[in-house]
Each structure stands twice: as C-alpha cells, then as structure tokens.
C-alpha cells in the first residue's frame, strides 16, 4: 500500500487558480470566457513592435497539425487539443495527473491596425507563434522639424 501525502490546501489553491483565470479573462480583455468550450487555457504573451504584433502561446504536447488559427472580423481564434496519453504497458495506471489535457480555445480582439490578410503561424518546441503584421499605412512616420 502506498502512502499518499495529504495536502489540505490543494483544493483552496485549485479554487483560487480557477477564480483567477475567470476574472483575468474578463478584466484584462484577453478574450471571452472560454470555460464552457475549453478544458484548459494555454498561457499567452503578446508583443507589439512598430510593424507587427506577435502572439506566443505555450502548447506543449499539442500536435501542430491539429492547431486551428482562424481570423474573422477582427477576432483571432486559436483552437486545439492535447490528447490523453495512455500509460504504457497495458495494466499501468496513472497515480497522479497534473498536466492539462483536452481541448483549448482562445479568442483575441485585434485592433484596426492589424493586417488580417498577412497573418502567419508556426509552432516550434511547444510554443505557437502567431505573427500579425500591421497595415503599412498606419505605421508611425518620423517627421523632421526644421529650425
């Protein structure tokens, strides 16, 4: 018989993480509430430079061919699935499961400066990179002042 360590605060921590995720989506405007359509939510970083936006999403264990990146009406949607990994050996069973699995879905509202026709995406080493160029006409231009 295996001894299992009891952590009385694990349920409180899980509840706090769920509440943080729920309020983070609503307060920061990082997307719509995806709890009804997602089993898990990949963390995302968004970078902005003068000529483009870059979205980086951590999706380890997700097959890049199964990731759907869709852009419509100024909304960028990312959908995919991390498959359930069956234990090797037939009779083996997991004793602990902490890694998220199942489907994920994220939506982001893009500004008018984003050029939807030139969006590209690639996935390397478990990181999805979506590059969203800005329209050339809205990029800042340096104006010299003569004196």
Image: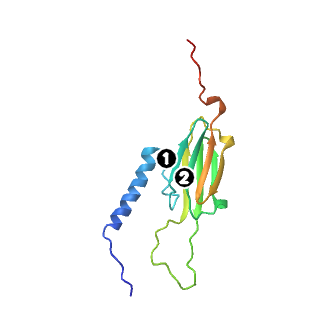
Residue depicted at x 36% and y 82%? 3
Q: Secondary structure at mark 2?
A: strand
Q: Answer with mark 1 or mark 2, whichever residue precedes in sequence.
A: 1
Local SS, label 1:
loop
**In this view, 16 is above or below 10:** above
Near mark 2 (Cα within 10 A), the count class, few <14, some 14-19 or many ≥20, is many
In the image, residue 67 above or below residue 50: below
- Asked whether 136 or 102 is in front, the reply is 136
The image shows residue 116 at horizontal and vertical percentages of: 65, 41
Residue at the outermost left position: 8
Distance in Å between CA atoms under marks 1 and 2 = 9 Å
**76 left or right of 41 in image:** right
Label 1 Cα neighbours within 10 Å, binned few <14 / some 14-19 / many ≥20: some
Which residue shows up at 63% across the image and 63% down it?
A: 63
Q: How many marks?
A: 2
Q: How is the image coloured?
A: rainbow
Q: Quadrant of residue 132?
A: top right
- Residue 106 is labelled as 2
Tell me, for residue 9, which label it has, or none: none
* Residues under numbered marks 1 and 2 in contact, where contact means CB atoms less than 8 Å apart: yes
| Furthest residue in direction front, as rendered | 147
If the image is split into quadrants, where does the C terminus sit?
top right
Up-down relation of residue 103 to residue 139 (above or below)? below
Taking the spot 50% from the left edge, 48% from the top edge, the residue there is 32
Q: Position of residue 1 (x, y in %)?
A: 38, 88
User: Mark 1 = which residue?
Assistant: 30
Q: Residue 99, image x and y in percent?
A: 49, 67
Q: Position of residue 77 (x, y in %)?
A: 59, 50
| Above-or-below relation of 96 to 18 | below
The residue shown at (31%, 66%) is 9
């Amino acid at each position: 018989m295996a001894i299992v360590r009891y952590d009385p605060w694990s349920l409180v921590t899980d509840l706090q993480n769920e509440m943080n995720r729920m309020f983070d989506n609503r307060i920061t405007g990082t997307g719509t509430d995806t709890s009804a359509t997602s089993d898990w939510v990949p963390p995302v970083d968004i970078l902005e430079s003068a000529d483009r936006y870059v979205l980086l999403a951590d999706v380890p264990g997700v097959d890049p061919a199964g990731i759907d990146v869709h852009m419509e009406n100024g909304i960028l949607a990312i959908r995919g699935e991390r498959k359930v990994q069956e234990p090797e050996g037939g009779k083996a069973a997991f004793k602990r499961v902490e890694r998220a699995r199942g489907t994920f879905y994220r939506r982001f509202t893009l500004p008018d400066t984003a050029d939807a026709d030139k969006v590209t995406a690639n996935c390397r080493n478990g990181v999805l990179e979506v590059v969203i160029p800005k329209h050339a006409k809205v990029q800042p231009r340096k104006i010299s002042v003569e004196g």
